[in-house]
Amino acid sequence: MEQVAPKTDVAEGSGPLLVDAARGRKPLSQQVLERIRAAGRISRSDVAKDLSVSPGSVTSIVSGLMDAGLVRENPKPQRDFSRGRPPVELSLVPDARHVIGVTLRDGLHNAVLTDFTGRVVADATLECASGRKEPEELLADLNALLVDLLSRSGLSRSDICGVGIGLPGFIDHQSGLVHWCPFLRDKRVPLGEFLSDNLPFPVYLDNDVNLLAMAELWFGMGRELSNFAVFTIEHGVGMGLILDNRIYRGARGIGLEIGHTTIQLDGALCRCGQRGCLEAYIADYALVREASTALEWDSSVVRSPQQTLEILFDQAKAGNEAARTIFARAGRYLSTGLANVIRVFDPELLILSGARLRYDYLYAEEVLSGTHRFSDWIGRERTRIAVNTWGDLVWARGGAALALSAETDRIGEGL
Ligand SMILES: [Zn+2]
């Protein structure tokens, strides 16, 4: 079991470190650009080696990228310059492009502004009204967040070439249609189109857990892998899957709703309306529901779900048997859910990611041994399970990676 401190850059650079199998479909100049971004700093000859192409073709592509203001040369630190020209390393020009990543939540939105290398230049948080909203109200929230973010960065709207936005629910990334989102009043809202019409740059929408997986691929534990799964528990339960360096979204763009797979026939009622969903046993609201029944609290005190959860966790740690039972039961359902993910997808690594993961019952020994007991079989190598307890900005960073990736594709088409 690996557990790591929050980290934003595993190595210098950002983006997937492994060259993906689908790269043949990308123009070579885009592949060079992505290689330089992933490495941070790299020589022309290493780019040629990594992409298995001739040094001559890299040299001519790099001069085009330098003319376009996208790539620059940096002198390589070296003591002895007596023999020949000092070697140089290539890097992206950080200010060549800027993008914004946003995560929208019920009552709280986060945003980051990043440069062309993926480095965070500024971040902002907006506390806003909770509850179901119209698209116009969401746009007003977004505008307030952008004003704050841009003032912190010293940039203006015209400097931004795209925004990637993650939100919970069933989101069709391709069309920008939101089939359902817990804080939108209506179903089937063409939110992507509405926001694109009202903001001066392209808008890319996606499910927030897909963007969490994207953040792991670009900045986190997934950088050195091409196939991995991310599992997260917050208000709901989500899963993201990276296959060959890309987000897998399903045929209709709304796949991987692991939280709403049935784990108990005729079981507990889920907020989706069905019974027995995994989420109905392990999400925040499920634990809060059990806590209010099991713990004898003064009912005149109003607590937020988050406060209830904190108290429940503290009591479990202090040895309260009812509180411990609630977590232990949730842990058993969690291990069943994780084992199902391993059985179905066989990922190289399963990352438990998100702020909630500081509740250590989630990766207690019993949960892990339960997961392996459910998923092991003869001759099969165990899937690695790791925990990444990032802060809240990670979700927004995934949005920035989505926008940066779209912008890099756009540059690739024009080169
Ligand atoms: Zn459900």
Image: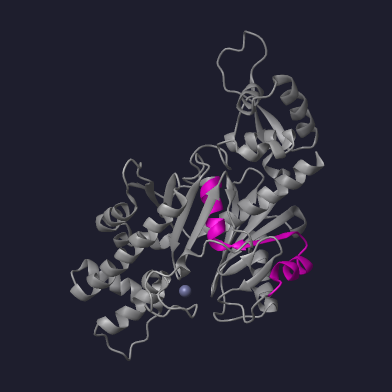
Residue furthest toward the front?
378
Residue at the limit of the structure toward the bottom, as seen here: 300
Q: Residue 314, how many percent across, how many down?
A: 26, 69
Asked if residue 281 is positioned above or below residue 205 in the image, the reply reads: below
| Residue 62 makes an appearance in the image | yes
Q: Residue at x 59, y 46 (%)?
A: 119
Residue sitting at x 44%, y 48% = 346
The residue depicted at 66 percent of the width and 9 percent of the height is 84
Q: In which image quadrant can residue 25 be found? A: top right
Which of the pair 271/36 is nearer the observer? 271
Q: Residue 408 in the image: x percent, y percent? A: 71, 45
Residue in the picture at 56% in, 18% down? 78
In the picture, the quarter occupied by the C terminus is top right
Give yes or no for residue 203 being in the magenta stretch.
Answer: yes
- In screen coordinates, is 288 left or right of 18? left
Start and end of the magenta stretch?
A: 189-218
